[in-house]
Amino acid sequence: MTRREWLAMISAAPLLRAADTNAPAAPVSIAKCASYDEDVTAVMAKMFDQLGGIERLVRNKTVTVKLNMTGSPGQRFRGLAPAVTHFTHPKLVGAAAYLLGRAGATRIRFVESSWATAGPLEDVMLDSGWNVRSLQSAAAGVEFENTNALGKGKKYSRFLVPSNPYMYPGYDLNHAYEDTDVFVSMAKLKNHATCGLTLSLKNCFGIIPASIYGDSAGVDQPNESPRDGRSAVGHEGRRQPSKSAPQELHFGANHDPGYRVPHIVADLVAARPIHLAIIDGVESIAGGEGPWIRGIRTVKPGVLIAGLNPVCTDAVSAAVMGYNPRATRGTAPFQTCDNLLLLAEGHGVGSTGLKQIDVRGVSIEQALYRYDS
């Protein structure tokens, strides 16, 4: 990217819509990390220091970390381990656990809504080739929960969208998302067939339980043994969630996944705020979110990105991928969908304006890895 192209990208936003200057902005750290064999703990520790440290955020707190383990461990691209294509890598998970524990977190709960099984999340990790015992020993108080159903809780927690919800007035989620002081989204640097990008914001689509929002969810009450995705409710709007949860505001008005999913995500991150975003861009895939998408390819951007505001972090991540984070529908990577970053900004979650974001560590230009090249 030439300097002229770079300046054009960051100045294009006024031609589309002025960035929301009232939306909060927070620093974002970028680090080079060419391989998972590097000392990823040291790299991540330096990034946290560049953000001002995480001690005051997590000391004496319960921290819940939403991983990205979309799909089934058996779905592999060219036989590669999911962690080097579309899953968060376990080495980074272990590093995060260690650093959170060192910073004083009293409980560290790793969660994912795995529709590959209704059982423990540990089973999914083992099937993916992860060393669960190693993760448990990375810090005191490490635990795991599959949040695709009621799990270890006794009831669901209701999160209301603060104001002007796009799709639903609120969402019923696993207790883990309420029984916490700090919420972390630990995502992968990759594209998404429906949303254009899968980063810290889109990662939160997976917090809605299939027991309520899945294709086989109960009509009146949750189905506590879900084994499918969320296409009918979330992607297509062909049915309402279980009547036990808040119902869609304008049911039947829009069946376009490219509209529905980004708006649901924006609602979710407004209702369940993210305090820390960590994005794994060491190795990933381009062209989609998993092996089931045709035309994907492996990429090795060799970067890690972290920030204290998910919209700011995703905006910087999008720029690292060679995209304008304020691009509108019809422009890469949002060719067939609405820009969920702008939708989240519209909820006041954070700023997409690169000029408002303090980028620390490696610059965007130095980290640039074009996903569409």
Image: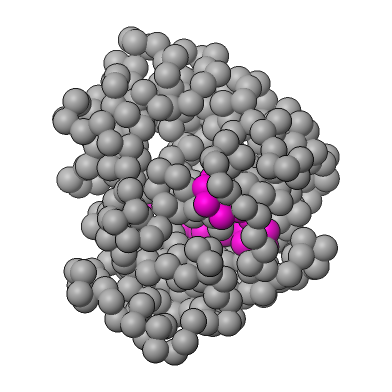
- Residue 144 belongs to the span the image colors magenta: no
Residue 78 in picture, x, y percent from top left: 73, 42
Residue 37 shows in this picture: yes
Residue 369: image quadrant is: bottom right
Residue 319 in picture, x, y percent from top left: 45, 71
Decide if residue 332 is on the left or right side of residue 260.
right
Residue 306 in picture, x, y percent from top left: 55, 66
The total number of labels drawn is 0
Residue shown at 80% from the left, 38% from the top: 129
Scheme by which the image is coloured? one colour
Q: Is residue 156 above or below residue 108?
A: above
Decide if residue 201 is on the left or right side of residue 153.
left
Q: Is residue 180 above or below residue 100?
A: above
Residue 200 shows in this picture: no
Question: Which of 212 and 153 lies nearest the eye of the viewer?
Answer: 212
- Residue 285 belongs to the span the image colors magenta: yes
Residue shown at 68% from the left, 42% from the top: 77
Residue 26 in picture, x, y percent from top left: 42, 71
Question: Which of 320 and 309 lies nearest the eye of the viewer?
Answer: 320
Q: Is residue 196 above or below residue 245?
A: below
Residue shown at 28% from the left, 42% from the top: 259
Q: Which residues are magenta?
A: 273-289
Q: Residue furthest bottom?
A: 3
Residue 120: image quadrant is: top right
Decide if residue 103 is on the left or right side of residue 168.
right
Question: Which of 173 and 191 lies nearest the eye of the viewer?
Answer: 191
Residue shown at 43% from the left, 27% from the top: 230
